[in-house]
Image: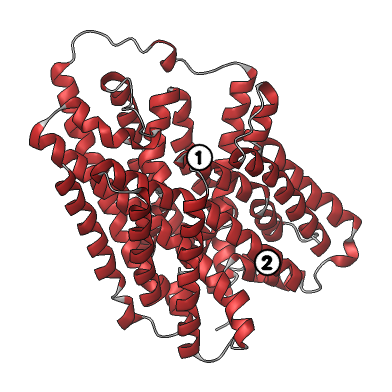
Amino acid sequence: MQLASVFAIAAVALATVSVGTLGLRMSRATSDFYVAGRAITPRRNASAIAGEYLSAASFLGVAGLVWQRGIDILWFPIGYTVGYLVLLVLIAAPLRRSGAYTLSDFAELRMESRPLRTFASVLTLGIAILYLLPQLQGAGLALRQATGWPTWVGAAVVVVVVFIAVAAGGMRSITLVQAMQYWIKLTAIAIPAFVLLAIWARGHTGEVDFGDWAIPRTDPIGLYTTYSTMLALCLGTMGLPHVLVRFYTNPDGRDARRTTVGVIGLLAVFYLFPPVYGVLGRLHLPQLAPGTRLDTMALQLPAAMTDGLLATVLTAILAGGAFAAFLSTTSGLAVSVAGVIDQDVLRPLLARRTGDDARGATSYRWASALAVVIPFVLSRVLEPLGLATTVTLAFAVAASTFAPLLVLGVWWPRLSTTGAAAGLAVGTACALVSLGSAFLRWTPEGWAGAVIGQPAAWSAPLAFTTMVVVSRLTPHRRPPHTNRTLNRLHTPESLLPP
């Protein structure tokens, strides 16, 4: 079983490096590294966005949570998908028309403030690193489950492969890689699901009693947790750096909307399968092996339902698909982090912020190295919280910070620089309380634990309200070119002069 899993993981890694190095021939200008020359078609971009969005939490974490907590967790895949619907309606096209490279660029363009750009850059790095940690930790767990190797090996493999792909050609390389990896992941999760369902159907007799596992929670705390999680997923999607940067790669706002519609369809198909593993695991794997983590439940399921060559092949397919999930999401996050480090740290230090594309490529590759090495070190120091748990925290942070800035920045002309900064500060402070509680393993009982553990239901509205109230109190701090910027965001490209 170990040899087959290693072969599957090696094949995925080799395919990633091979496709990623195509960027060496395709990427020349700075825009190629940051936004793939803004020339990615909606079909390819939809596959790439779905590929990077379907992270370790989607491939392994959701299945493990369904196995553990029951049908309440089915809100997770719904929330992950609905987040793109919210993004489609509110900001997809205006964000593309902004012409920005990163979230920091958008913050500076809309609010005309360098300090706010710096604030946005720090937030981008924080959210991206928080999202990167479970990818690297999950890669180590998956490789250890499949091969018995130490956990640092899987994380190191992901770091090396992602660095090669990102440094080779930036966004152009990663677009090709992620589009390919979506279909790898869909195949890797669908084929074992159908085979295991057939095995279950062949041996199933009578009705199955799941007990309380199949009954949704209706107590006030359970409902609050569900609604807060849904709000975090719906609003947090639009604030994830690796998600938003992909909309800058479309040729225009119309294609950005078409891309988002395609993403919703691709996500809906994929999320049919993780619950299957959770339900089958509940039936055939009631207890996990000692010393194993919840996130590896799906990898243990084939051996629990069958044996011999079939179990080996199915486990290898799942291991390869899981590794594709780690690689694709890490690649997207690395691109977004590298863009911020390059633009806001390295280039100012080197005084080479514009003009020379060759120098830009060199500094971008140094930024790419930092973008993967720093999270790798942190992943070895910090104890894993669980794939879905850590990713949900990243969504909550994004929902409490960037979501208010983007929605109000795109749609409300009275947003002031002071109001935007105050809202970001309040949202960040609220998120830090939840993050601190999670990483310190301090979770109070009852309502206090629910409110701190799932803060989006109160932190996001509080950040929105702060931005609105402070902006109304500081109308003199409204950016002087607000009307011109909003016209740019909302005017279709076809109506603009050539």
Q: Quadrant of the N terminus?
A: top left
Disc 2 marks which amino acid? Ala
Numbered circle sitting on residue 107: 2
Q: Is residue 112 visible?
A: no
Q: Quadrant of residue 405?
A: bottom right
Q: Is residue 62 visible?
A: yes
The residue positioned farthest toward the left in the image shown: 309
Q: CA distance from mark 1 to mark 2?
A: 31 Å
**At 45% from the left edge and 54% from the top edge, which residue is drawn?**
260
Q: Position of residue 172 (x, y in %)?
A: 38, 73
Q: Nearer the viewer, residue 431 or 85?
A: 431
Q: How many numbered marks does the figure carry?
A: 2
Left or right for 338, reference 90? left
Q: Quadrant of residue 224?
A: top right
The tag earlier along the polypeptide, 1 or 2, is 2
Q: Nearer the viewer, residue 332 or 7?
A: 7
**At 46% from the left edge and 67% from the top edge, which residue is drawn?**
335
The residue positioned farthest toward the bottom in the image shown: 356
Q: Position of residue 148 (x, y in %)?
A: 26, 44
Disc 1 marks which amino acid? Leu
Numbered circle sitting on residue 385: 1
Callout 2: helix, strand or loop?
Answer: helix
